[in-house]
Amino acid sequence: MSSCQPVPQDPGAAAPHMLLRLSQALGAVAAVMVLALACLINADVLSRFLLNSPIRGVAELVELAIVIVVFVQLPLAVATGGLIRSAELHQRLSRQSPRIGTCATVLFELCGALVLAVLAIGLWPEMIEAWRDGLYKGQPGIFTAPLWPAMAATVIGSALGSLCYIASLFRRMTTGGRAWT
């Protein structure tokens, strides 16, 4: 059962169902990580306060986890049209001239796809190096955490975000402002 509905004006929001579902799954992973981080930070605070002994590596893990959380949520923000932008300006342009609003959306999608693709492609060799050479964050002998998971999340999130923009742009261009759902 499909119906013809207007393509959302929000940049990236016309991404196909498959990319949206994958983005939602990554968003759920990020939500679980945020909960785990909150528990870890609370445990560290309690350990410092009650036992006068911090948990080793909390700062390093939080630093790496924040990067992971941001980049695995990025595709969901793109696919739902939730990236920060001047929505008021965009809505005003779209009301006054739907053609200009659509052109602004297309331009934003093109730029977003390009920036995220460049980021993913540029970080790919560094991610491989981090994996191959065992690069880490922390102090040897005290606590170390591998860098490659954060690098991989950055590459995957950027690549998937770029794909969401490209798919949305393609859908917008081939349906003439209408999308099949």
Image: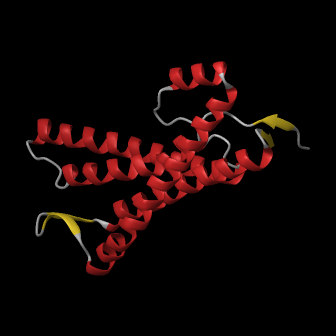
Question: How many numbered circles does the render carry?
Answer: 0
Q: Which residue is more in the foreground, 164 or 26? A: 164
Query: Which residue in the rendered view is the most extreme toward the left?
Result: 52
In the rendered view of the protein, which quadrant contains the N terminus?
A: top right
- Check the image and report above or below for 12 versus 116: above
Say left or right for 27 vs 145: right
Position of 17 compared to 121: left or right? Answer: right
Q: Nearer the viewer, residue 74 or 171?
A: 171
- Rendered image quadrant of residue 144: bottom left
Whether 136 is drawn above or below 67: the answer is below
Q: Position of residue 50 (x, y in %)?
A: 13, 37
Residue 181 visible in the shown view: no
Q: Is residue 71 above or below residue 181?
A: below
Q: Position of residue 155 (x, y in %)?
A: 43, 62
> Residue at point 33% right, 47% down?
66
**Image-based side of 112 in relation to 20, left or right:** left
Q: Which residue is nearer to you in this view: 43 or 5?
A: 5
Q: Residue at the far bottom: name it.
A: 132
Left or right: residue 45 versus residue 94 is left
The colour scheme used to paint the residues is secondary structure
Where's the C terminus, which quadrant? top right
Task: Residue at 25%, 50% (x, y): give it.
Answer: 63
* Residue 58 can be seen in this image: yes
* Residue at 36% in and 66% down: 123
Task: Tell me residue 118's x, y (percent).
Answer: 43, 61
In percent of width and height, residue 25 lies at: 58, 50
